[in-house]
Structure formats: structure tokens, C-alpha cells
Image: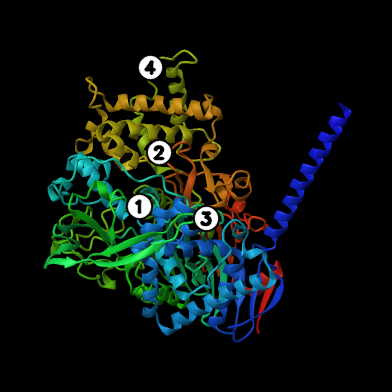
């Protein structure tokens, strides 16, 4: 027995030693790719020394004798910290994910190839000025200089992910940066999905009920929408969705997660210190690392500092000594879906206003890991690329003998958005900034600007010109062979909405409706926000003058105007009614929930139970209201729509009819639906979070999911690379934390402000900013998530252009010298 025990002990000790040795080797190999920030390196392609000073938050401050050398330094710094992220974005734009991920990403590659955004980026390179091409080339040279150092010094393949996936990295090219601009455009648009969804709803519902379910933003009425069946009678009433849950690697986000953001500015007479103020927090999907990367560039025109996206030589949001700029998604309707009629005698032709015309075609090969490659035949009509029925549920609204195509400003082959962004970084005034962005194409944004004296907001991006007789005004797919539905060029830049020197001294945008203009210069029928703007307006009006701190307070505000507005409507016949119910009964649980909500002020605080009860109630309520009417199509409405619920409970335009269950004999009232939905919500809460309502925490359900899109799915490893945080806020708060919407954890916080910045031009160096994780994309770096806890607590780091302040607490200084 003793002998057996000794052998078991030896075997256990040996296995443990081998595991420990494997872990040590794994750590050593992975740590080899951690860059040494305190080094002097000889490189090619620079004319004079470049200095990269990294402050104690790992923000690089880049100094050089010329703009090209500074852009070289930015490319070098981006590659040091975010090489895997950059190469993944490039692979995505090129439609080459399946080469390393196999069958899983074929669908993504298929769609990217058909949209052809990488080749469009290559073509757009010719449209850039010599100065822009020089900046792009210098940036590419900086990226490639780090790749050379990785190869020379055996620096762990440049990133730990390259130990899991193929380590071959092609040199960075200027077109790669232009392709990433277009890739961002794909992530920020929801119009294609919205058009298709509205058409599918129109096949099931009368026009007035479609307006309930997908309401227009408040404002003067809009002309009636034609029924989709009247445009294409051959389409079946309902076809099940073919769309699967989106892959974390996909740039195509569901409609609920299209771009969103906040930005507001105050003129000197509305500022306590007498200088302009600007706050901006762009909203994108959360990842680890964050998509944003903080940097400061010392250009010949002066210093600029703010948020960059690795892969592009731009400070997209930030400030210089003279100008601050912020971005919010404009929701401009810059995309149209067309149904093209195929020639029955020749499938390579479609109908046009002038008769049958050949489709342009080209083949492309998708190489798939461990499988045979696939050859695609890509087609384009005069309107744009033809998309197969399997994408975006287009098959559900495409009649037999037809195909779908799209026209989209993102698909411009002469896209000068990069050049406009580089000009903006050098602008000295609000007027200069507006002029600089005239060449900006896509994705359309609302640009908020402040200089030392004035504030403004301008919608930038190409606005399509449509015929005033367009059959659906761009709200649903239309026959692509009718000239009246086709685009007729681009509207003049002056036609884009512009707000200069607002009368009240404050301008802002939360993706809300900004203008009421008749079609075709309407900008959009679909806007991203009808709720946050209410809270923002109140916070701005509560003070005569504002400070940096009051702008921060607004940026971090967690009060839900939706909760304050809807709860009195849906609970008005339930509050304080009925007799006390016995303990342990569903009725008693309902009374306790209603008592909690009656005393609640709508604050979506992570430590409170009321936000979870409220959120679960609204979710179950909308489900009960729409499921019997539209069946499986209800799955597409995964988030409660406040305007829809308000219309129903106010019976606007007869919308109260949604409360009656069609399949039952009794006529249910809205009070009945509210009561049953609350009971459903409490059952769900009991199953997932327990029956003690008072001990619930919203933050337990509303965790921010900064997940690594690749390593974050690997068991054990995911606990090291994913960053999860309990957070406040919700779908409709200024501190926006968009919930996932789908089971098993529908209230996870998956989309929000990955960057926050507040700029005070009374004392510019007192400006502050933050990102949601850390600067490094390397999980073993202390800068992988060091800013994340500050971000969660609503704290910031200094945003200074003072070089001595950066040097005073630098974690390292990298000196690049000409070889």
C-alpha cells in the first residue's frame, strides 16, 4: 500500500511539475511580445528622430520634426499595443477571416467580399491629396517598422494571439487604413436592417399598426407609408428569419446596436469660467481591449490629443489648443435597398429604366482553414452590389424572379473621409472645422465643434439626393428599375443641417431627431434616440452656467426619463389597489414590486433592485403585446420601444388594440396586460436572481462585457482576457449601457461609451478623458485593463498637451532614430 502511495505521489508530483513548466514556458513566450517602452531603436523611413513619451496611463505623446514622422510614430505605437486588433480589422475588411477561423466566419467573409469595401478603399487611395497619401504612407511605415523589430528581436510574434493563430502578418498598406474607415461605417448603420424589418412588418400589419411598432420620432406627421405587398404582391406574408445570433467577429451589428453617442457644448456666456465647454462620449460595442486608443500628436500645426482607432492616423475625437471636436451618429438615411427584376431569359441581366442591362460580375475565392476554398461570383447592378437572399433576411421580402441590391454612401470609390479628418486635426476655429469636413463621405456623423469663442454642430457626410416622388421615401425597399426611386447624386454640403451660435448658448445631440424638413432633404425618418434627449435638456436648463464638473455629471447621469414617463402610465391602475395578499403568493410579490417602484426616482443605479424589476417588466410587457400579433417576428424587437409602449397605453391612434390577445375570447385591457407582464417578470427574476426583491442588484444583471472577441471564448483563458464590471445606467440613460436583449442574460451591458472626454477651453489642460479598458491589447500588460476601473467609477485622467507633464511621470520613452 505504501509503495503504491509513493508511486502515486511521484506521478502526481511529476504531472504537476510538467504543468507548472508548461505554464512558465507559455507565460515566457506570451510575455516576449510585451514592448519595451524605454528603448532607443534605429528605423528606416524617418527623416529625424521621433520621440514617443508614454505617460503613467500609457498614453503616447509623439514628437517629431515633421507631420510624416509623427504619423510614423503613431503607427509604431499602435502596432506595439494593438497589433492583433489592427490585423483582425484588416482581415475583416478584406473578407479573409475564414483563413484562420474556418467555417465559422464564411458568412461574414461572403458579405464583406460582396460589398467589396477593401477594393473600394484601394480605389479611394487615388482620390486622396498628396499630403494625405504621405500621411497614410508614413503611418504604414511606422506599423511596418514595429513588425520588423518583432521579427528581428524574436518578440513573441508581436502579440500573444499569434501563438494560437497563424503568425504571418502582411506589411501594412495605406489602403488598409482607408478600409478601416469603411469598416466603421458598417458598424454604425442600421438602415438596411430597418428597411427590411419595416417591410416584413408591413406584410403582417396595417400601416397604422406598423407606425405603432416602428414609430416615427416625435414631430409633425409623415406621409402614409405604402403597404409593401402593394409594391411586390408576390412576396409571402411571413418568412422565418434566416439570421443567426451575430458572431463576435462580425462587424455587422444588429439594429439595436447601431452607432450611438452623446455630445454637447456650451458657449462662453453659459460657462462659469468664461470658456467654451465640450463633452463627448461615442458609443460602440464593448470589447477587450476597447476599440479606442488615447494618443497625443505634436503636428506642425500644433498638438492634438484624444481618441484614435488603431489602424488609422487620426484623432477622431479630441482637441487641439484651439479647437475641440466630438462625434455622434447622425442616423442620416444614406442607404437604400432595391429589389431588382431579373431577366427571365438571362439571369445575368436586370431591368433598368432603359431596358435590360448586364450585371457587372467578378469572381473571388474565399480560402477556408482545413476545407476546400469557395469561389464567389459577385454581381453589381447600376444601383449597387447584389446581396444574396440569405443576408439581412432579404429573402423574406424578395419576390421570385428578383434579387436585392443596395446603394450606400459607404461604398463610394472616391471616399475622401480620411482627408477630411486630417484637415480637421489642423483646423483652428469652428469655421475652419466645418470647411475641413466638406470632403467627408461616410459614415455620416453629427460634428460638434468648439473653439475659444463659439460652438456649433454640423451634420457631415454625403446626403443622397432622392426624387420627391420616391415610392417609400427610403423607408422600405423599392423597385430598382424605376427612375423615381433611384439616387440622383449627392446633396450640396450646405444642405446638411448646421447649428451655428445657438441662441441659448448650448448645442447638443444624443442621436435624437435634429430637424423637421420635408422629404427629400429630411435627413432621416429613423432616429436613434427619443428619450435621452429629454433628460439632457432638463440637465442643461437646470443651470444658468455650466462647468467641467456639471458636464461630467451629465455624462454620468443614470436617471431614466423612460422609467419616469412610462411607469405612471403602465402602473396607474395597479399602484395602491387591492387588499394585502398572503405572504408567499404571487399577488404579495407583485405588491412588493409595485411598492418599490412607487418610491423609485428612475435612477438606474447598479446597487438598487428597482432598475431590474422595471427592465424585466417592460421586456415582458412588450413581448405580451406583440407576440400574438406578429408571431416569430417579435424576436426582432428584443428591446422595449418606449414610443410604442407610450402609444399603446395612451391609445394614440387606436394603438390600445395591441392589448387585446387575438387568440383568446375575452377582451384583455392594457391593465390586464400590465399585471400579467409584471407577474411574468417576477417569475423570471425569481428563477435567475432569487425571490428576495429588496436584495436584488441591477449591476449583477447589467455587467459590462468587455470580452476578447477570440480568446474570450476559450475555457479558463476567458477568465484572464475578459473584463466584466458591474455598471449603472441602461438603454435610455445618458450614461448609456445598452442591454444585450436576448437570453440567457438579456440585461448584460454590451454597448456604450468606450471613450469619454470633457474639454474646458477656459483652461484647456484641465480637460479630461478615459477609455473603458486600457491602452494595451496584451493581457499580460498592466495597461490591459488599468483604466477600466476608473471608467466604471466615472473617473477620468488628465488630457494635457503640456509635454513636461507627460515626461514627469512617464512609464517609458521610446526614441526612434534614422538608421
Q: Give the Cα separation between the discs numbered 3 and 2.
A: 22 Å
Residue that carries the numbered disc 4 in the rendered image: 578
Question: Foreground mark, 2 or 1?
Answer: 1
* Lower position in the chain sequence, tag 4 or tag 2: 2
Q: Are marks 1 and 3 in contact (CB under 8 Å)?
A: no
Residue that carries the numbered disc 3 in the rendered image: 552
* Lower position in the chain sequence, tag 4 or tag 3: 3
Q: Give the Cα separation between the discs numbered 1 and 4.
A: 40 Å
* Lower position in the chain sequence, tag 1 or tag 3: 1
Image spot of residue 232 (x, y percent): 15, 49
Rendered image: mark on residue 563: 2
Tell me the quarter of the picture where residue 435 sits. bottom left
Q: Is residue 181 left or right of residue 776?
A: left
Q: Is residue 667 left or right of residue 565?
A: left
* Lower position in the chain sequence, tag 1 or tag 4: 1
Q: Tell which residue pokes out farthest to the bottom in this image.
A: 47
Q: Are marks 4 and 2 in contact (CB under 8 Å)?
A: no
The crowd level at tag 3 (other Cα within 10 Å; few <14, some 14-19, many 20+) is some
**Secondary element at image label 2:** helix
Amino acid at each position: 500500500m505504501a509503495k503504491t502511495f509513493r508511486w502515486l505521489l511521484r506521478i502526481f508530483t511529476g504531472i504537476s511539475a510538467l504543468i507548472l513548466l508548461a505554464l512558465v514556458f507559455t507565460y515566457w513566450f506570451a510575455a516576449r511580445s510585451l514592448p519595451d517602452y524605454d528603448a532607443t531603436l534605429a528605423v528606416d523611413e524617418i527623416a529625424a528622430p521621433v520621440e514617443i513619451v508614454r505617460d503613467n496611463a500609457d498614453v503616447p505623446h509623439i514628437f517629431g520634426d515633421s507631420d510624416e514622422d509623427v504619423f510614423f510614430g503613431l503607427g509604431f505605437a499602435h502596432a506595439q499595443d494593438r497589433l492583433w486588433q489592427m490585423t483582425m480589422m484588416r482581415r475583416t475588411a478584406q473578407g479573409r477571416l475564414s483563413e484562420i477561423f474556418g467555417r465559422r466566419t464564411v458568412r461574414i467573409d461572403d458579405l464583406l467580399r460582396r460589398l467589396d469595401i477593401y477594393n473600394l478603399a484601394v480605389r479611394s487611395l487615388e482620390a486622396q491629396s498628396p499630403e494625405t497619401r504621405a500621411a497614410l504612407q508614413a503611418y504604414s511605415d511606422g506599423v511596418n517598422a514595429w513588425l520588423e523589430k518583432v521579427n528581428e528581436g524574436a518578440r513573441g510574434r508581436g502579440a500573444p494571439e499569434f501563438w494560437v493563430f497563424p503568425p504571418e502578418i502582411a506589411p501594412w498598406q495605406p489602403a488598409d487604413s482607408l478600409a478601416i474607415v469603411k469598416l466603421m461605417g458598417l458598424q454604425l448603420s442600421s438602415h438596411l436592417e430597418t428597411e427590411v424589418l419595416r417591410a416584413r412588418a408591413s406584410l403582417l400589419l396595417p400601416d397604422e399598426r406598423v407606425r405603432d411598432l416602428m414609430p416615427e420620432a416625435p414631430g409633425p406627421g409623415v406621409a402614409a407609408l405604402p403597404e409593401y405587398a402593394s409594391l411586390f404582391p408576390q412576396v409571402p406574408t411571413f418568412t422565418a428569419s434566416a439570421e443567426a445570433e451575430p458572431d463576435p467577429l462580425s462587424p455587422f451589428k444588429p439594429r439595436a446596436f447601431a452607432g450611438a453617442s452623446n455630445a454637447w457644448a456650451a458657449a462662453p456666456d453659459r460657462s462659469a469660467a468664461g470658456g467654451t465647454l465640450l463633452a463627448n462620449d461615442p458609443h460602440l460595442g464593448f470589447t477587450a481591449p476597447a476599440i479606442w486608443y488615447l494618443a497625443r500628436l505634436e503636428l506642425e500645426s500644433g498638438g492634438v490629443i484624444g481618441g484614435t482607432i488603431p489602424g488609422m492616423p487620426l484623432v477622431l475625437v479630441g482637441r487641439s489648443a484651439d479647437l475641440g471636436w466630438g462625434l455622434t451618429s447622425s442616423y442620416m438615411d444614406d442607404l437604400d435597398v432595391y429589389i431588382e427584376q431579373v431577366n427571365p431569359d438571362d439571369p445575368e441581366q436586370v431591368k433598368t429604366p432603359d431596358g435590360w442591362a448586364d450585371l457587372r460580375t467578378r469572381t473571388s475565392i474565399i480560402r477556408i482553414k482545413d476545407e476546400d476554398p469557395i469561389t464567389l461570383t459577385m454581381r453589381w447592378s447600376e444601383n449597387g452590389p447584389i446581396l444574396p437572399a440569405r443576408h439581412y433576411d432579404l429573402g423574406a421580402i424578395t419576390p421570385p424572379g428578383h434579387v436585392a441590391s443596395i446603394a450606400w454612401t459607404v461604398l463610394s470609390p472616391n471616399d475622401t473621409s480620411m482627408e477630411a479628418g486630417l484637415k480637421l486635426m489642423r483646423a483652428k476655429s469652428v469655421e475652419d472645422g466645418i470647411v475641413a469636413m466638406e470632403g467627408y463621405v461616410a459614415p455620416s456623423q453629427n460634428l460638434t465643434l468648439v473653439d475659444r469663442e463659439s460652438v456649433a454642430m454640423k451634420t457631415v457626410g454625403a446626403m443622397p439626393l432622392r426624387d420627391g416622388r420616391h415610392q417609400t421615401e427610403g423607408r422600405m425597399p423599392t423597385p430598382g428599375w424605376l427612375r423615381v426611386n433611384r439616387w440622383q447624386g449627392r446633396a450640396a454640403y450646405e444642405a446638411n443641417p448646421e447649428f451655428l451660435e445657438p441662441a441659448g448658448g448650448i448645442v447638443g445631440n444624443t442621436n435624437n431627431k435634429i430637424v423637421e424638413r420635408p422629404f427629400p432633404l429630411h435627413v432621416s425618418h429613423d432616429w436613434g434616440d427619443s428619450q435621452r434627449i429629454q433628460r439632457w435638456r432638463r440637465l442643461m436648463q437646470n443651470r444658468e452656467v455650466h462647468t467641467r464638473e456639471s458636464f461630467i455629471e451629465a455624462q454620468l447621469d443614470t436617471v431614466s426619463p423612460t422609467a419616469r414617463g412610462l411607469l405612471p402610465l403602465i402602473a396607474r391602475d395597479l399602484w395602491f389597489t387591492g387588499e394585502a395578499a398572503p405572504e408567499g403568493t404571487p399577488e404579495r410579490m407583485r405588491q412588493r414590486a409595485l411598492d418599490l417602484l412607487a418610491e423609485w426616482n428612475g435612477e438606474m443605479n447598479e446597487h438598487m433592485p428597482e432598475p431590474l424589476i422595471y427592465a424585466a417588466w417592460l421586456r415582458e410587457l412588450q413581448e405580451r403585446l406583440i407576440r400574438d400579433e406578429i408571431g416569430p417576428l417579435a424576436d426582432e424587437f428584443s428591446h422595449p420601444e418606449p414610443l410604442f409602449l407610450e402609444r399603446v397605453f395612451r391609445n394614440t391612434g387606436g394603438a390600445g388594440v395591441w392589448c387585446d390577445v387575438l387568440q383568446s375570447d375575452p377582451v384583455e385591457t392594457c391593465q390586464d396586460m400590465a399585471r400579467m407582464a409584471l407577474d411574468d417578470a417576477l417569475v423570471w427574476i425569481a428563477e435567475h436572481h432569487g425571490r428576495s426583491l429588496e436584495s436584488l442588484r441591477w449591476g449583477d444583471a447589467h455587467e459590462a462585457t468587455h470580452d476578447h472577441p477570440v480568446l474570450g471564448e476559450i475555457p479558463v483563458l476567458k477568465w484572464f482576457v475578459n473584463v466584466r464590471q458591474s455598471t449603472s445606467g441602461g438603454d435610455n440613460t445618458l450614461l448609456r449601457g445598452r442591454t444585450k436583449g436576448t437570453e440567457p442574460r438579456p440585461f448584460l451591458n454590451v454597448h456604450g461609451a468606450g471613450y469619454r472626454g470633457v474639454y474646458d477651453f477656459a483652461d484647456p489642460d484641465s480637460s479630461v478623458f478615459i477609455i473603458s479598458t486600457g491602452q494595451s491589447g496584451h493581457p499580460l500588460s498592466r495597461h490591459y485593463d488599468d483604466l477600466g476601473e476608473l471608467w466604471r467609477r466615472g473617473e477620468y485622467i488628465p488630457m494635457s498637451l503640456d509635454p513636461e507633464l507627460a515626461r514627469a511621470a512617464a512609464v517609458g520613452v521610446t526614441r526612434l532614430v534614422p538608421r
